[in-house]
Image: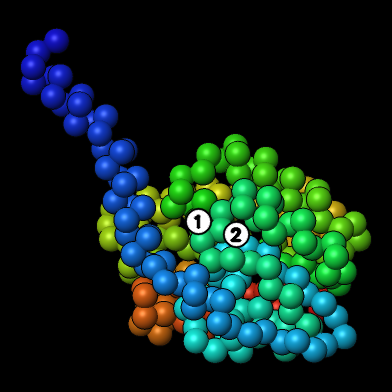
Amino acid sequence: MSVRRRRLLLVAASVPVVVVAVLGVEVELARRGDRLAAADLSFPAEGPRTAVWLGDSTAAGVGVTDGDDAVASVVGRSLGQRVEMLAVSGATLAEVVDEQLPAVAALRPDVVYVSVGANDVTHLTKVGDFERRYGELLDALPAGVPVQVLGVPDMGAPPRLLQPLRAIAGWRGRRLDGVVRRAAAEHDGATYVDIAGPTGPPFRRDPDRYFADDGYHPSAAGYRLWADAVLATTAG
């Protein structure tokens, strides 16, 4: 093998490593400090029905400074729900299953919302592992309790991610979103909520309006679009 060919092969082999490293740095910069911000938010504490939210920063409302603007709060007020927030910023699906799921049953929910997957996109979780853990999650939720399964958002939209990383994230997001859609279809009581379809186009057209200042998480207006998508597919 020639020296030139050997160098080309080494460069080609290094590309995935570089992409993963840079993508991780970009996302970490976007998320920095968000765990504390999410912890400061409050959610509806009164209502005839209990809604438990599992997931990552989008479920937890990262991107807004007032908990009333979070998707869980907008949905909760519309449906008369008391919101129990178990979601944690930065959580992957595995962390939702291992750390959040065990607390659900004791809260005696009337409905469960799941919004997770974005961090699995950026952490490069294997599709097969994501599919297996999502099935575990839905199987383990309390029997007879309806579940609203929010799809993976359009990960190719956040301006905080630079090209070509944005395109790569978008592609991976669509793959994992397909897993979420199929998992919901295969589990009784689970309803898939398309997030990328109705919110992706406006987020791309007007990022200044629909993204928070970090260019990664939804703004109050962005979460309103998310809530509209949830409300369009839930019976309450």
What residue is rendered at 75% in x and 87% in y? 45
Residue at disc 1, secondary structure = helix
Checking the image for residue 17, the label placed there is: none
Q: Residue 117: image x %, image y %?
A: 56, 56
Q: Residue 14: image x %, image y %?
A: 25, 34
Q: Residue furthest right?
A: 144
Q: Residue 155: image x %, image y %?
A: 44, 60
In the displayed structure, would residue 138 be above or below residue 218? above
In the displayed structure, would residue 17 be above or below residue 180? above
- Name the residue tied to disc 2: 116
What residue is rendered at 58% in x and 83% in y? 41
Cβ–Cβ below 8 Å for labels 1 and 2? yes
Left or right of 139? Residue 166 is left
Does the image show residue 205? no
In the displayed structure, would residue 76 be above or below residue 51? below
Front-most of residues 236 and 69? 69
